Amino acid sequence: MTPAATRPRVLVVEDEQEIAGLIRHALERGGIATVEVATSGDQALKLAGEQPPDVIILDLNLPVLGGLEVCRLLKARAATAQVPIIMLTAMASESDRVTGLDAGADDYITKPFSLRELAARVRAALRRGKSAEAPAMQVYRGRHLVADFDAVSITVDGAPVRLTRREFELLKYLVENRNRVLSRDRLLERVWGYDQVIETRSVDVHVGRLRAKLGPAGPQIETVVGLGYRFLA
């Protein structure tokens, strides 16, 4: 079973605590993902904005802000636009499904539902997200930083910057997931591949060195206290 620290994150937006608890139990017991629960639309937007999850399971009938509006807002924001959203609702008519999908949902499950089917849908969404995780863009151009990952060329204000292989891979992964908070454990898994016994402190050291080498572009790598790092673009 995948260690909890390295599992994908699923945000369940559901105001019925019993249903939310069942979904959490099914996904965490099966080692599919770690689960965070929001019980209202505004709370969902706040949590997703602070740390975008890998998948969102979204009820439509929510207090404060309805699920359709939450979906539209999430898809309109750069940080969450690519996060798969599975709508979970008692509204089962064809027009309801069309409305949900038009709002930006990636999948639609009606209540009552099978936990096994929901788990399968989440796994499928995670697979799709993983295959699309590395965007086609191979060149990043910012105010100070130009990174051509295909040519392995990094320049800051027109001057070439020499990075170690690990620093290059760290920058590449941060840029590919720009505006998204990445935990130290996620960075260890994706950049280091756990091919050696290292501590999360090593991530901090490498980030510090990378920032120093990037000079005026260094502050684009933001420390999110208690969570990890985010590349601001």
Image (cartoon, rainbow, N blue to C red):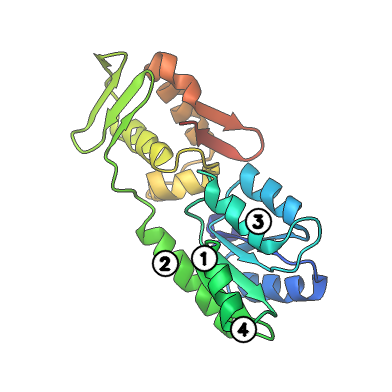
Q: Residue at x 68, y 50 (%)?
A: 45
Q: CA gap, disc 2 to disc 3? A: 24 Å
Mark 4, residue position: 93
- Disc 2 is placed on an element classified as helix
N-terminal label among 4 and 2: 4
N-terminal label among 3 and 1: 3
- Measuring from the top left, give residue 48's x and y in whole percent: 63, 50
N-terminal label among 4 and 1: 4
Does the image show residue 169? yes
Would you say the residues marked 4 and 1 are in contact, meaning their CB atoms lie under 8 Å apart?
no
N-terminal label among 4 and 3: 3
Mark 1, residue position: 102
Q: CA gap, disc 4 to disc 1? A: 14 Å
- Disc 4 is placed on an element classified as loop
Mark 3, residue position: 70
Q: CA gap, disc 2 to disc 1? A: 22 Å
Mark 2, residue position: 127
